[in-house]
Amino acid sequence: VEYTIYAPDWTWQNREVNILVVLSGAGDKLQPVKLNLVFPEGKAEDFEYKGKTEIATAIDGSMRERHAFVGIKPLSSAPRQVYPFQIRLQTAGGEAVVDYPLRTIRGAAVNPGVLAVLLPAGVAAAWCIVLLVALNKMAARGAWRTPSPQATEPEAPEAWITRNPN
């Protein structure tokens, strides 16, 4: 059995992580496979996870399967650090252990929801007010309605302008 694991190496606190395991059969005989997600020793309470930590399946050479550990969420109350997860694959032929270090970083600056929409809108509104005040001070009253003077040809052309190129 061949395997490939797809998973992020970092996540924000209070955001979910998903781990995808792709299995491909190599022989023509059906092989039982057991996948285990092993949480870091003594750190399981730093995460919220309601899914299964063990998945059992069987695969042969003509099959390709995808299995996922979905919804692993580091809590915002847990310290930011690198958590040494492991993914264990067991077959009749042996066991493979894949170390999966997951780094947690500080969560989003604002919580998702109303504040996440209002904060950028407030910043944009504040800059609109600043621009209105600044432009009002710099321009004459009603200047936008007055047409600019027509551009005219200068009476004496500059010496560097060549009228008849050779």
Image: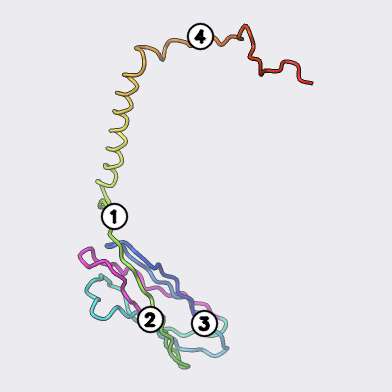
Q: Mark 1 to mark 4: distance in Å?
A: 53 Å
Q: Amino acid at mark 4?
A: Pro
Based on the picture, tell me whether residue 64 belongs to the magenta stretch. yes
Identify residue type, mark 1.
Ala
Residue at (29, 44) in percent of width and height: 117
Q: Is residue 94 above or below residue 158?
A: below
Query: Do callouts 4 and 3 mark residues in contact (Cβ within 8 Å)?
Result: no
Q: Which residues are magenta?
A: 63-86
**First reached walking from the N terminus: tag 4 or tag 2:** 2
Which residue has dot 4 on it?
Answer: 149
Q: Which of disc 2 and disc 1 is earlier in sequence?
A: 2
**Disc 1 secondary structure class:** loop
Q: Residue furthest right?
A: 166
Asked whether residue 40 is drawn in magenta, I would say no
Asked if disc 4 and disc 2 are in contact, CB closer than 8 Å, the reply is no
Please tell me whether mark 1 or mark 3 is closer to you in this view: 1
Mark 1, residue position: 108
Q: Disc 3 versus disc 2: distance between alpha carbons?
A: 16 Å
The earlier-in-sequence mark between 3 and 2 is 3
Exactly how many numbered labels are in the figure?
4
Pair 4/3: label in front: 4
Disc marking residue 2: 3
What amino acid is found at the position of numbered circle 3 in the picture? Glu
